Structure formats: C-alpha cells, structure tokens
Amino acid sequence: MKWRSRWWAQWLLIVTVFIVAGCGATKAVRIESEPSGARIMVGVEYVGDAPVVVSLKEKGALGSRGDIVIRAEKSGYTPSTRILSNEALPNRLFFTLEKAPSPSATSGLGQQQEQQQQMQGPTIVITPGKAEVGGQNTQ
C-alpha cells in the first residue's frame, strides 16, 4: 500500500510541475516592419519600435492563452494588426505597412464640389421692379 500512495504523490507532483511550467512559459518573438521603425503595440502596451524582440506568453498545458493582438503603426502609413489566437507562436512576425492615401487625394473632389456650391449659392435674378431668388418670386 505504501508504494501506491508514494506513486500517486510523485505522479501528482510531476503533473503539477508540468501544468505550472506550461502556464508561465514565454517565447521571444522578433517583430519587424517595412518600413522599419513602426511603433509596435501588444494589446494596449507599447513595446518598442520595429525591429524589436518581445516576450509573449505561450499556450499553457491546459488550454488557450487567449488572443494576442499585435499592432504596427507609423505616421504616413495605414496601421496593420495581427491577432494570434490559439496557435503556436512564431519566431518572427513581419508587418508590411502600406502608404496611407493623402487627405487631399481622398477628399479633394468632395471639397472642390462643396466649395463650388458655396461660391455659387442661390441664383438671384434681378429685373427692374421684380426680384427672384432661386426661381421664386420674392414680391
């Protein structure tokens, strides 16, 4: 009987160590960007400018670690986001940032039309003894 209780105690100790070690394990992941120097956020925490090496939590022995959201952003470029769900962590993440469209390119036509409408305003026709605004008689 003694050997059974000792065996259970050893088994329980091994399983406990395995679970605790698996829950706290981290992995170094190198994050790079093109162009370099992008601001890197893990969740809501700023971790540095790319290239940067961050320590991320591995999936534990008993299940998921939750999603890890990584965002790269740089002035003049459209931000990029990656969500690492319940998969194994990569050794390296690479973000390719696209040039953001210039504000004048996206809204220039709309602004130009709006300015023309403001300049034109309502049509005013003046004839002696009679005034019309926008096709309606004001007298």
Image: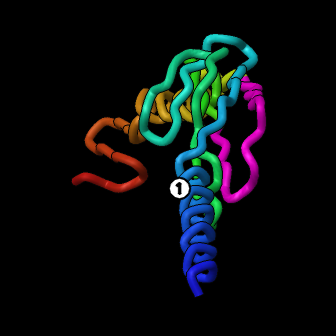
Point 62% across, 58% down: residue? 18
Residue 4 placement (x, y as % from top left): 62, 82
Q: Is residue 138 magenta?
A: no
* Residue 69 can be seen, yes or no: no
**How far across and how far down the image is residue 60, in percent?**
61, 57
Crowd around label 1: few <14 · some 14–19 · many ≥20 (10 Å): few
Residue shown at the point (49%, 34%) measured from the top left: 114
Task: Work out whether residue 129 or residue 21 is closer to the camera in this orientation and state it.
Answer: 21
Q: Residue at x 51, y 31 (%)?
A: 41
Residues drawn in magenta: 81-98
Number of marks in picture? 1
Observer-nearest of 36 and 23: 23
Q: Position of residue 76 (x, y in %)?
A: 60, 17
Q: Amino acid at mark 1?
A: Val
Question: Residue at horizontal 74%, vertical 31%?
Answer: 93
* Residue 100 position by quadrant: top right
Extreme-left residue of the structure = 139
Specify whether 85 is left or right of 49: right
Q: Quadrant of the C terminus?
A: bottom left
